[in-house]
Each structure stands twice: as structure tokens, then as C-alpha cells.
Image (cartoon, rainbow, N blue to C red):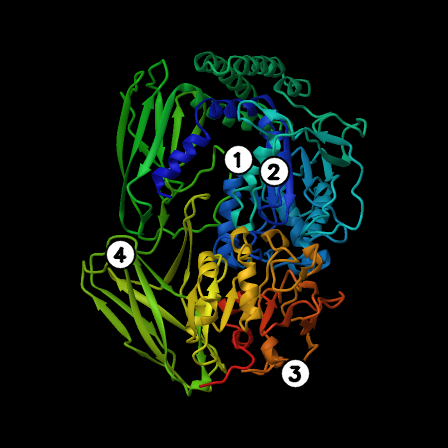
């Protein structure tokens, strides 16, 4: 999707009266609600959508991790790369509610990091630090001052350990945030204790295809009408919640719900106000409107000003969609707010801190509503999506007045890389008449010491998220300034250095034959000098050629440079560093771009190294493999690196080709979408007639039919929570030690199960037809062993192997045992080395 297409889609999604209505709605509610989860995608989107878009409450989501331990249904990003990707997905999802987002973890390698699936909350607390979790969440609560807290999941057996740990932390933080003796270093920094007023738990069971809650949920004490239809946005709140869920594409989120009556339920666990347990609304007993706020404010003159402001809010909403009448009422609210702030200026902050933050929030929201009703459309567009330190950067601001009044009291600030030093646009004698469109050309200098883009350097705040290369619009003397984001601009090195993979295998069984590594060099920004591209080798290793030189002005947009690497056969794992020298600067970074249509462009920039992992690998000679890919793994790439003849097969190929020409057919992870499932009869025939079929893990909701998808019935265990091994070093026991998959061409021994990454496997097989043998047994600590990680069956004249071990993930981390087992899987049992 091009930037223009993306902007068109954004305009269609938030056009016309929808944007104006969504700007007015928050003015009518002063309450706030914080949802707490462990990962991006844990938020209760349908409930949050109702509270934000119907009631107008401020919504916040606090997440412990960035989600680096999850799966990726649409790409190959994993680990920290996936964490950066999912951070951007969460910000996109938040924009649909809208809500602000707050992270426990602020950096890669943070102590609170997603370490993969866990079945035990104590494991998560030990890994993250029980006290650290609470300190981070209490800090967020004291900074954001929510009225209500609500963790997404219940602390019951059968739930994800991360979810349970966060629920425990949330319940504890309810009290800790109000305790002046808790985390006194925060108090020393200027934060104040904050008493949350209510705490709600889910009153819905988490039992389903993934989790297996063993306890009934608590009784509902309040119901939320998430099936209610929003006539302005044209959907129910359940459906609007799915607009948000659909941004979590890496996790396969986004379901279609037909409009229907629906109630979502919560259980009130704690409450600081004296009201009945059964409620009509989560904000019962708490101030909702500016008029309600007036009832608790005792400063002379302020209550009446708040009641007047509330009256004008109601008048503005009643005037919708008449922009002129709305704007007139908003101007009156602005006058009331100014008068209130004048009275507060002589009052000690300690006397008003329990509620003044609500008024400050309303002032920011008022500024956004004034902009949406003004008729002004202001856009900032940069001439490039990339810039580098030391360069000039240009763009333009466009102002188009679609309203009925002339605007001449505007001020504009443009921010570059230093958010403390904006550029003031000269707006003196500048006016935009009705129907007039004006452009302002802008130029910024990027400092030599400007930091590269970092995907984790901000929290998402709707309407006032100050970020690099944004524009701030102000109406002199009217409301708060409005932050207008531009097309994303990333500060990057002038060139990007990238390998096909983060490492490669160096086969000691081929007598140290050299291996080749292809370095891609992509030019991002202008370069005025010659460019030297090289690869540094440690002692005892050689690289040919050691460098390449490209004359000034001749470096293309993208180019490749091949290096031949050789070293000692008895060596251990090493790392090599590529580099480019241009304009007197040495660049060693890799820029991983994440350019997907459902998120804003982002990237992760890290020092680039090439790992070289020695391995003793027997690989079958002249075996021909067909590979079916869904785009979620790169096992085919690694097979090609090992010298295997791999052909990529489409669904049509499986239906129309003579599959007998392939010695082995491998199906990628989670590849059985609806169209591939239709090829099951062809794959069954292939196996029965002598073919070797390897299927990797699939989920039951991937259109996998336990009876008809595999060549013979295989039942994938459900709920999946109980059918995975999360310990990457779980002891592996051989149930069939003489089976050919464990012995040929590579004898799989204890060392092959060492140093696995993240977990052993998932979506294990629970039961299988009698033709299959279960080869391995393994268990997580304190759990019953699972046998379904690797099964194999003689079907007719051929073989079918189903592997639930995450070989694809281990290959990306150059784990030798995974490569050796993969070689065995693709080798037919009667294969003769030639």
C-alpha cells in the first residue's frame, strides 16, 4: 500500500461527521478506566469501545510486555523484531477505541519481557520480579490517575501464566498506588499517591480453544451493552471492538460479528464509595460529567463555571452536526475553562490534585473538538519517509478552510528530531479565508548527533502524542494546541546492511568447505562519497573479498555483495561484523523495516552481525523437496542453504502437478487455510503412493480438520494451553529410539536438544490413527508428559510425519539439533546417498 492509499484509507475511516462526533463525545464524561493486560491484544476491546465511544470516558491500557514471545501469522518477524511490530499494532488498535497505551517495559532486553508461553503465574513473577511488576504498574497508575482498574483475565488454573501474574499485580497495585509508603522513590520524584476508586474483574470464563479456566467466573455485578448499535459509526460496540482487534494481524485477530444484542459482564471486587454491589454502570457513584464534578469542588466560583461548561457541552452535542453552532458552544466552554484556571492559579495544587487532572484532560479534548469543528484541514507532508543525521529535510504544510469564517489567529510549530526545540512558523499577517487553500514550505536540519529511530520510545496518547516530525496547531487564546501527525519519518543510517538471515551454518562434515553469505546494501538517503563495503573476520577465518568499493554517486538503491567465508573445522560459534564507510562515517547497523498497511511505518535498528554456527550435518544428496508456504516461516530457505533442491508449490500445483516427482513435500507452519485444506485428497494420494509428507504444526482454527486434513486422522489437542511445551530445555525421552527419524541420516542425541530457544513446541497431537507412532515424550516442570510433539506413520507405500516442534524458530537462531532433525524429516527412510 502506498502512502497515498494509506491516507485515503485513513480519510475514509475517519471522515466527515464521524471525526467531529468522536471529538465531541469525550467532553461529556470526566471518568477514566484502565484495563490491564500482559501483552498487546489482551485488551477487552468491545467493552473499552463502548466506554470510550458511547460514554466518552478516558480509556487507558497498561501492558506488561511488548509481545515478543508470540507467534506471527503474517510475517517472519520474531523476538524483539516482533515486539517492535506488535507495539505498533497496539498503537494502531488503540486509535480505534480510542485509548492511551502504557508499557511496563521501555526497552529491548527489559527485565519485564515476553519470554513465551507460561502456564504458571509464579514463573512469570520470578522471571519479571514480583516487586518490579508492582512498582512499574503503580508508577503508571500514579501518573495517569485512573478512576477504575480492571485486569482482563482471571487468576485461575488453565489461564496463561502471564495473564494471571498481571491480574495479581493489578489487585495489589490497587492498594499500593494509594499507599504513601509504597515505592517512596516515586514520591521523591514528585508523583503522588493515587487512590483508584473501583476494581473490576471479568465475569466471563476464559475457557475456549486456547485456555481452559478450571473455575467458574465470579458473579456479574454490572453489565455493559456491547451489542448496542452506534448510529454515527455504523456498527455495534462489539463490531467497533473488532476494528481494533483487526489491527493485531500478527496474532490472527479480527473476527466478524453480526450485529446482535449482547451484554458483557464484570464483577466489582473493590470499591471506595458506599454504593450497592449491583450496578447499572461501572461509573455509578463516581462523577461522570462536569456538572457532577461541580458537586465535589468547593473553590469559590468554580462549581458554577463547571455547571455552565457542562451546559455548553450538552448544547454542542445537541447541535451536531452543525459545525458553526457547535463551535460557538465550544468557544463558551473555552471561556469557562480559562476562568476556572485563573481561579486555580492562586490555589495550592495539593488542594485540587484529586480532580484538576480531569480538567486538564478536558482542555486538551476541547482543543481537538475546536479543530474538528473549525472547518480547517491542516496536513503536514514530508518529501521523504527517511532522513539521516546531518542532512536537510523538507516538506510542506497545507491549510484548507472548509468553514464559514476566516482564520487569522493561528500558530504553527514543527518538530524535528529534538522535541524540546520546535520550529516556529511565521504566521504574522497570515490568514485563511473561507474556501481558501494555502501551502507553507518547510525545511529542517537534522543534527549530526540525532538519534536513530527507536520503535519503543513513546507511549500512545490519542490527539496529543508529541512525536518527531509532527506539526502542532494552535488557535491563539483558544483551548489547547492540537498535535497533527505527518507521514512517518524515520531517522536511519544512510545505508542499511542486511543478511538473508542473522546467521548461517558451517558444516564440519564437508571438510570446512567455504560458505557464502550475501550482504544486501540498501541506500536510504543521499551519499556524497565513495562507499566501502566490507566484512571483518576474526583470527583464523578468511573472507574473500574482504572489501568492495563503489565510486561516489554509483551506489544503486539496492545492491548485493557476496562474501566467501572459510575457517577451522573444529571452531566454535563466531560472529562477524559487516560495515559500510560513506561520507566519513562507519555504518554497521541493520534496519529492519516493518511496512504493513495496518500499522504506521516503523523500523528496528540494531548493530548488524553475522553468526557462523559450526554443525555436523548429514544432508541427503539429490533429494527433491516441494514446499508449501503460508509466509510464516522460512524452513524452505534453510533447506536451500543446506543444498537441498526446493521448489515452492502453490495450491494449484498440488492439484495439477505430478507430485511423484518430489521425494518429500513439506507443509509450512499453520499453512492449512481453507484453500490448502481442499488439497488434502491429493496429498493423501501422494503419501499412499510412496511419497514422504512432512506437516508442521497447525491449529484447529486454521481449517485443520482432524479427520480429513491429514492422510489419516490426527487430533490436535485442545485447549491449546495444555498441549504445548514452554520450557525450551525440557528433557526429551525417546519412545521409539530405533525409528529412522531419530537415526538417519543424523543420529539425534542429547546434544541436539540443547540450547533451544523460547520453547520446544506447541499444538501437540492428542490422538492419532493407529498407523502413527508417537516418538517423543517431554513435559514442563510439574506437568504431565506430552507425547504428541513428533509422530510418524507408514501410510500405504509412503510416510507422513507431523512435527509440532518449533523447528522454524530454532533455525533462525542457528540451533544445530533443529537442522539435523529437519534433515532426517525430509529424508525418505529408504533413501540411498549417492
* Residue to which mark 3 is pinned: 738
**Percent coordinates x, y for residue 256 in the rendering:** 58, 38
Tell me whether circle 1 and circle 2 mark residues in contact (CB < 8 Å): yes
**Compared to 110, does 363 lie above or below?**
above
Residue 417 in the image, given as x and y percentages of width and height? 37, 45
Horizontal side, residue 547 vs residue 797: left or right? left
- Residue depicted at x 30% and y 20%: 432
Q: What is the crowding at mark 4: few (fewer than 14 residues within 10 Å), some, or many (at least 20)?
A: few
Quadrant containing the C terminus in the rendered view: bottom left
Q: Residue at x 49, y 18 (%)?
A: 334
Residue labelled with disc 2: 45
Residue labelled with disc 1: 96
Q: Which of the marked residues, 4 or 1, is nearer the chain's N terminus?
A: 1
> Which label's residue is closer to the chain start, 1 or 3?
1
Task: Answer few, some or many: residues within 10 Å of disc 3's Cα (few below 14, many 20 plus, some between 14 and 19).
Answer: few
The reply to whether residue 778 is in sight is yes
Q: Quadrant of residue 30?
A: top right
Q: CA distance from mark 1 to mark 2?
A: 9 Å
Q: What is the secondary structure assignment of the residue under circle 4? A: loop
Which label belongs to residue 520?
A: none
Element under label 2? helix
Query: N-terminal of the two: label 1 or label 2?
Result: 2
User: Foreground mark, 1 or 3?
Assistant: 3
Residue corresponding to mark 4? 557
Q: Residues within 10 Å of mark 1 (few under 14, many from 20)?
A: many
The image shows residue 404, relative to residue 422, as above or below, that is above
* Above or below for 146 versus 307: below
Amino acid at each position: 500500500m502506498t502512502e497515498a492509499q494509506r491516507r485515503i484509507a485513513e480519510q475514509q475511516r475517519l471522515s466527515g461527521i464521524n471525526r467531529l462526533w468522536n471529538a465531541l463525545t469525550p467532553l461529556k464524561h470526566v471518568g477514566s478506566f484502565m484495563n490491564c493486560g500482559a501483552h498487546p491484544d489482551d485488551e477487552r476491546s468491545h467493552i473499552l469501545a463502548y466506554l470510550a465511544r458511547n460514554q466518552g470516558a478516558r480509556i487507558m491500557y497498561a501492558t506488561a510486555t511488548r509481545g515478543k514471545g508470540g507467534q506471527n501469522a503474517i510475517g517472519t518477524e520474531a523476538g524483539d523484531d516482533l515486539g517492535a511490530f506488535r507495539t505498533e499494532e497496539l498503537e494502531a488498535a488503540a486509535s480505534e477505541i480510542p485509548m492511551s497505551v502504557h508499557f511496563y517495559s521501555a526497552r529491548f532486553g527489559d527485565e519485564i519481557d515476553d519470554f513465551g508461553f507460561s502456564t504458571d503465574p509464579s514463573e512469570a513473577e520470578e522471571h519479571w520480579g514480583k516487586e518490579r511488576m508492582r512498582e512499574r504498574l503503580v508508577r503508571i497508575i500514579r501518573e495517569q490517575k485512573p478512576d477504575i482498574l480492571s485486569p482482563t483475565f482471571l487468576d485461575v488454573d488453565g489461564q496463561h501464566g502471564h495473564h494471571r501474574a498481571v491480574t495479581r499485580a493489578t489487585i495489589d497495585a490497587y492498594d499500593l498506588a494509594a499507599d504513601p509508603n509504597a515505592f517512596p522513590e516515586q514520591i521523591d520524584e514528585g508523583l503522588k499517591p493515587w487512590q483508584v476508586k473501583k476494581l473490576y474483574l471479568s465475569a466471563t470464563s476464559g475457557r475456549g480453544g486456547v485456555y481452559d479456566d478450571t473455575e467458574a467466573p465470579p458473579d456479574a455485578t454490572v453489565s455493559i451493552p456491547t451489542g448496542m448499535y452506534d448510529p454515527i459509526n455504523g456498527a455495534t460496540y462489539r463490531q467497533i471492538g473488532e476494528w481494533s482487534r483487526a489491527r493485531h494481524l500478527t496474532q490472527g485477530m479480527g473476527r466478524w460479528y453480526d450485529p446482535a444484542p449482547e451484554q458483557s459482564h464484570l464483577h466489582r471486587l473493590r470499591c471506595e464509595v458506599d454504593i450497592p454491589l449491583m450496578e447499572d454502570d461501572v461509573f455509578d457513584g463516581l462523577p461522570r460529567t462536569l456538572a457532577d464534578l461541580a458537586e465535589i469542588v468547593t473553590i469559590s466560583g468554580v462549581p458554577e463555571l463547571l455547571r455552565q461548561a457542562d451546559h455548553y457541552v450538552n448544547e454542542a452535542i445537541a447541535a451536531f452536526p452543525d459545525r458553526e453552532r457547535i463551535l460557538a458552544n465550544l468557544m463558551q466552554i473555552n471561556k469557562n475553562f480559562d476562568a476556572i484556571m485563573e481561579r486555580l492559579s492562586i490555589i495550592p495544587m495539593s488542594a485540587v490534585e484529586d480532580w484538576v487532572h480531569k480538567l486538564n484532560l478536558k482542555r486538551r479534548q476541547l482543543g481537538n473538538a475546536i479543530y474538528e469543528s473549525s472547518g480547517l484541514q491542516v496536513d503536514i507532508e514530508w518529501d521523504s519517509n527517511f532522513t539521516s543525521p546531518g542532512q536537510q529535510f523538507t516538506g510542506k504544510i497545507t491549510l484548507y478552510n472548509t468553514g464559514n469564517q476566516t482564520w487569522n489567529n493561528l500558530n504553527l510549530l514543527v518538530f524535528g528530531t529534538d522535541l524540546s526545540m520546535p520550529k516556529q512558523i511565521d504566521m504574522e499577517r497570515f490568514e485563511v479565508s473561507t474556501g481558501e487553500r494555502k501551502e507553507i514550505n518547510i525545511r529542517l536540519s537534522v543534527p549530526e548527533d540525532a538519534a536513530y529511530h527507536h520503535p519503543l520510545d513513546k507511549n500512545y496518547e490519542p490527539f496529543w502524542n508529541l512525536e518527531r516530525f509532527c506539526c502542532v496547531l494552535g488557535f491563539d487564546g483558544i483551548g489547547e494546541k492540537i498535535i497533527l501527525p505527518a507521514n512517518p519519518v524515520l531517522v536511519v543510517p544512510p545505508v542499511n546492511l542486511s543478511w538473508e538471515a542473522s546467521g548461517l551454518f558451517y558444516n564440519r562434515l564437508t571438510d570446512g568447505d567455504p560458505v557464502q553469505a550475501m550482504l544486501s546494501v540498501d541506500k536510504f538517503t543521499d551519499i556524497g562519497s565513495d562507499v566501502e563495503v566490507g566484512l571483518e573476520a576474526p583470527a583464523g577465518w578468511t573472507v574473500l573479498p574482504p572489501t568492495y568499493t563503489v565510486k561516489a554517486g554509483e551506489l544503486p538503491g539496492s545492491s548485493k555483495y557476496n562474501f566467501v567465508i572459510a575457517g577451522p573445522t573444529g571452531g566454535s560459534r563466531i560472529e562477524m561484523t559487516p560495515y559500510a564507510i560513506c561520507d566519513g562515517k562507519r555504518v554497521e547497523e541493520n534496519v529492519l523495516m516493518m511496512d504493513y498497511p495496518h500499522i504506521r511505518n516503523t523500523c528496528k535498528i540494531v548493530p548488524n552481525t553475522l553468526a557462523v554456527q559450526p554443525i555436523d550435518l548429514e544432508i541427503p544428496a539429490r533429494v527433491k523437496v516441494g514446499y508449501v508456504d503460508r509466509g510464516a516461516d522460512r524452513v524452505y530457505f534453510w533447506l536451500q542453504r543446506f543444498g537441498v533442491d526446493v521448489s515452492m508449490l502453490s495450491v494449484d500445483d498440488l492439484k495439477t502437478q505430478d507430485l511423484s516427482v518430489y521425494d518429500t513435500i513439506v507443509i509450512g507452519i499453520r499453512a492449512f487455510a481453507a484453500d490448502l485444506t481442499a488439497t488434502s485428497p491429493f496429498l493423501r494420494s501422494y503419501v499412499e503412493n510412496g511419497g514422504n509428507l512432512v506437516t508442521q504444526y497447525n491449529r484447529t482454527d486454521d481449517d485443520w480438520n482432524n479427520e480429513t486434513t491429514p492422510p489419516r486422522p490426527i487430533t490436535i489437542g485442545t485447549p491449546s494451553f495444555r498441549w504445548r511445551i514452554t520450557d525450551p530445555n525440557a528433557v526429551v525421552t525417546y519412545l521409539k529410539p530405533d525409528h529412522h527419524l531419530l537415526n538417519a541420516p543424523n543420529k539425534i542425541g542429547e546434544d541436539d536438544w540443547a540450547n533451544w530457544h523460547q520453547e520446544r513446541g506447541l499444538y501437540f497431537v492428542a490422538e492419532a490413527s493407529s498407523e502413527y507412532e508417537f516418538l517423543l515424550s517431554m513435559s514442563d516442570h510439574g506437568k504431565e508428559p506430552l507425547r504428541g510433539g513428533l509422530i510418524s506413520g507408514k501410510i500405504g507405500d509412503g510416510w507422513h510425519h507431523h512435527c509440532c516442534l518449533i523447528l522454524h524458530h530454532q533455525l533462525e537462531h542457528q540451533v544445530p539439533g533443529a537442522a539435523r532433525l529437519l534433515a532426517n524429516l525430509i529424508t525418505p527412510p529408504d533413501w540411498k546417498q549417492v
